Image (tube, helix red, strand yellow):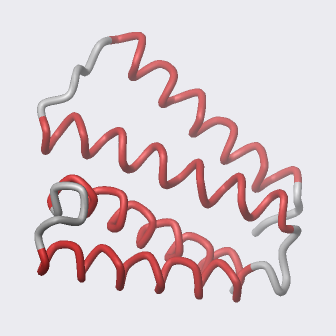
Amino acid sequence: MSWYILILASLFEICWAIGLEYSDGLSKTVPALGTGIALIISMVLLAQAVKNLPIGTAYAVWTGIGAVGTATLGIILFDEPASLTRILFIGVIVVGIVGLHFASGGH
């Protein structure tokens, strides 16, 4: 169950990271509020996940999923570059996330 909570925490991390762009540096009230709420939910869920997962693994997976999701949405939503090299290195992060999951005995 902790892995599912960690994945959910990571999805909220993506939400708050993308929210930073929509809130224009937290200067727009409604998007800034949504960003803050997503940040709090993400942290609370991460805290729950680390009750049963090693902190190093959980944090690396949380930030890895957040980085992959945010970089991917940056390409889709904000017209950021989608070069082959960039996509390759996003893939490397995914391999690292999967590797950490299996190396820690995750199911």
Reply above or below: 35 against 90. Answer: below
Q: Does 11 sit left or right of 77 as displayed?
A: right
Nearest the eye: 27 or 107: 27
Residue 12 x/y as whole percent: 41, 72
Reply above or below: 43 against 100. Answer: below
Nearest the eye: 16 or 58: 16
Q: Residue at x 64, y 78 (%)?
A: 46
Q: Quadrant of the C terminus?
A: bottom right
Among the 4 quarters of the image, the one containing residue 2: bottom right
Residue 80 x/y as whole percent: 20, 28
Q: How many marks?
A: 0
Residue 83 x/y as whole percent: 29, 13
Q: Does 4 sit left or right of 52 as displayed?
A: left
Q: Does 68 sit left or right of 27 as displayed?
A: right
Q: Residue at x 66, y 55 (%)?
A: 61
Residue 103 x/y as whole percent: 88, 50
Q: Residue at x 24, y 80 (%)?
A: 34
Q: Residue at x 59, y 35 (%)?
A: 93
Q: Quadrant of the N terminus?
A: bottom right
